[in-house]
Amino acid sequence: MSNKQCHIRLLPHDRLIETRPGRTLMEALMNKSIFLRSDCGGKGVCKKCQVKIVAENGDTEVKKACQVIISEDISIEIPASSMLSSHIITKAGVSLPKSFKDRFKTIHGKDAYGIAVDLGTTTIAVYFCNIRKGKVLSSLAVKNPQALYGDDVMSRISAIGQEEKNLGQLQKLVVKAIEWGVKELSVSLDLKKEMISQMVIVGNPTMIHIFAGVDPKSIGVSPYQPAFHEAKNIQSDNLGFKLKNFSIQLLPQVSGFIGGDILSATLAVDLENQPEGTLLVDLGTNGELMLKGKDQLFATSCATGPAFEGATLSCGMQAIPGAINTVQINSKENLSEYTLINPSNSSELKPSGICGTGVISAVTQFCQKKIISSGGAFQNGMKQYIIAPASASQDGSAIFISQKDIRSVQLGKAALITGIEFLLKEAGLDTPEKIIIAGAFGSFLDKKDMMSLGMIPTMDSGRVEVAGNSAGAGAIMALCDTAFLDKAIQIANKVVVVDLACNQDFQDVFVKQLSFSNIPTKSF
C-alpha cells in the first residue's frame, strides 16, 4: 500500500495539514479537529460545508467539502459561514427531576467538573457540569461526524465489516467531535478543560461499542447481541483523547439495540415511580421504548430512521435557529405559513432548512388538505412542495418537501407505532396510561401532529408529556451521583426485552401502519 500523503494548505494563514488520498476533504479536516457544518450528514445536499478551492494561478472554485475527494495537494479557503462554531449550535436542553436536585441542596465542598455526553447516531449532545452542585453549566449539540459512513447503525456496522480500519476511523471521529465540544464549552465558561475529572457517556449499543473501540459486528447479525453488556470504566487516554487523562463511565447495554441511552432516559423521567402503563418513547434515529407494566419494565427498539432528526431530508437540518419547525397551509393558491426556531426573536433570521418537527408538521398538513393521498403520494402530479421560496431563504435556495421525504416519515412513523403495539401486547395492555416523549426531537414537537399521523396512539393530549433530552439528563445524573449509575445497572438486569426482529407478525403490522388513511381531512 502506498504511503503517499497529500497536503491541504489552509489559506490565508498558510497552515499545512496532511491526509491520505481517497478521503473526502470534510473527513480530512475533521481528523485535524477542523469541523465544518454538515446538516445533511455529508450527503452533498445541504451546501453548508462549501469551501473555496484555490488554484495556483489564484482562480477559485466553490465546492462542497463532503464531495471533494483528496487525490493531490490542494489549497483551500474556508468561509466563516461553513465553520461549525458555538454560536450556531443550539443548547441541548434537559429537565432534571426534583428528586435529583434535592440531593444537592445541602452539599458543600470544592467544585469538581465533569462532562455528560448523549452519543446519538445523528447528534452528539455535550454537557459541561459542576459535579459537586449537580448543575449543568453549559451545553451544546453537534452533528455526529460518523454520518459520513452512513445514516444508521447498520450502515456503520457494515462499513466496519468492509474495512477493518474503519472501526478506528469511526472511533477517532467521535472522540474528536466530543473534544471539540468540550473545548468550545470550556472557552464559553472561561474554565480550563484540564479541570475535567470524569465523563459519563450514554448511547445505543452500536455507538457505545464503536466509541470503546469494540467491533459491533455481533449486533448486525442474528441473534443481534452486543459484544459486552456490562457497564465499563475506561481511561480517556486509552481512547485517544488529547485532553488531560480522566475516567469515562459507560452505562450497561440491555441488548443489541437497547442501550444506556434508554436506561438513562428511564432515570431522568423516574419511570419506576410513574403510573402503571406509562410509556417512555426516546425518539431519534433509533426509536427506543420502555413501558412500565404491572410488575415489570418492558423495552424494545425500532428503526425509525434519521428523518425525525432532520438528517436525510432534502432540505433537512438540526433543530437549531433558522430551522422551520411548524407549517400551516391555508389555501391552494398561496405559499404555506411557517415558524422558525428563533430563541432570540430576531426579525432578520431567515429559514435555512427544515428540522424533524417541521417535516412532521408539514406532512400532517399535506394529509389534512389532501395534498398527498392516504398512501403518501403527492396528488395531481406534484413532485415536491415548496415550503419557503428561494427569495425568502438564508442561502437563496428553495426549502421544500420531496416525495422521498414523505416516504421517510412514513417508514419512521410505521416503525414507531408498530413497536408500541407489540410492547403493549407483551405487557397485556390495550393502550398506554401516559406517554412521555424524550429526545431533542420532541422538544419542538406538536403532540397532536404525532397522533394525527399515527406515530403514537390517539389519547387525551394532556396525558402526553414532552421531556426534552432525557438520555442527556440521565447521563448528567449518573455523572453527579453514582447512585444513579447503580440504579441503571439494576434496571438493565431486570427489564424484559421484546424482540421485534424475531416476531413473525411484525412485517404485516408494519405494512398496514404505513398508511395515512385514518387522518381526518379538512377543506381549504
Image (cartoon, helix red, strand yellow):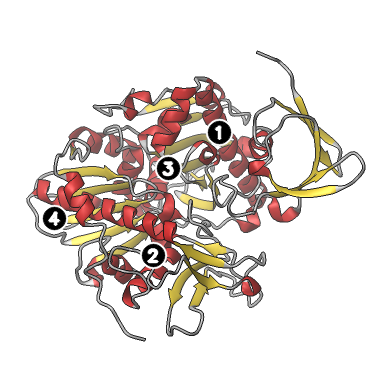
Q: Amino acid at mark 4?
A: Glu
Q: Out of 438 and 166, give the one closest to the viewer.
A: 166
Classed neighbour count for the residue bearing mark 1: other residues with Cα under 10 Å, few (<14), some (14–19), many (≥20): many
Label 1: which residue? Answer: 175
Disc with the residue nearer the chain's start (2 vs 3)? 2
Residue 107, horizontal then vertical, whole percent: 43, 47
Tell me the distance, in whole angstroms, between the alpha carbons under discs 1 and 4.
Answer: 39 Å
Tell me the distance, in whole angstroms, between the alpha carbons under discs 3 and 1.
Answer: 22 Å
Tell me the distance, in whole angstroms, between the alpha carbons under discs 1 and 2.
Answer: 32 Å
The quarter holding residue 349 reads bottom right
- The numbered dot on residue 276 is 4
Q: Secondary structure at mark 3?
A: helix
The quarter in which the C terminus is drawn is: bottom left
Disc with the residue nearer the chain's start (4 vs 3)? 4
Residue 383, horizontal then vertical, whole percent: 46, 65
Q: How many marks?
A: 4
- Tell me the residue at 42%/69% (across/down): 381
Residue 47, horizontal then vertical, whole percent: 64, 54
Confirm whether residue 272 shows in the render.
no
Label 2: which residue? Answer: 360
Tell me the distance, in whole angstroms, between the alpha carbons under discs 2 and 3.
Answer: 36 Å
Q: Amino acid at mark 1?
A: Val
Label 3: which residue? Answer: 480
Q: Out of 285 and 288, give the one closest to the viewer.
A: 285
Confirm whether residue 150 shows in the render.
yes
Camera-near label (3 vs 1) is: 1
Disc with the residue nearer the chain's start (1 vs 4)? 1
The quarter holding residue 57 reads top right
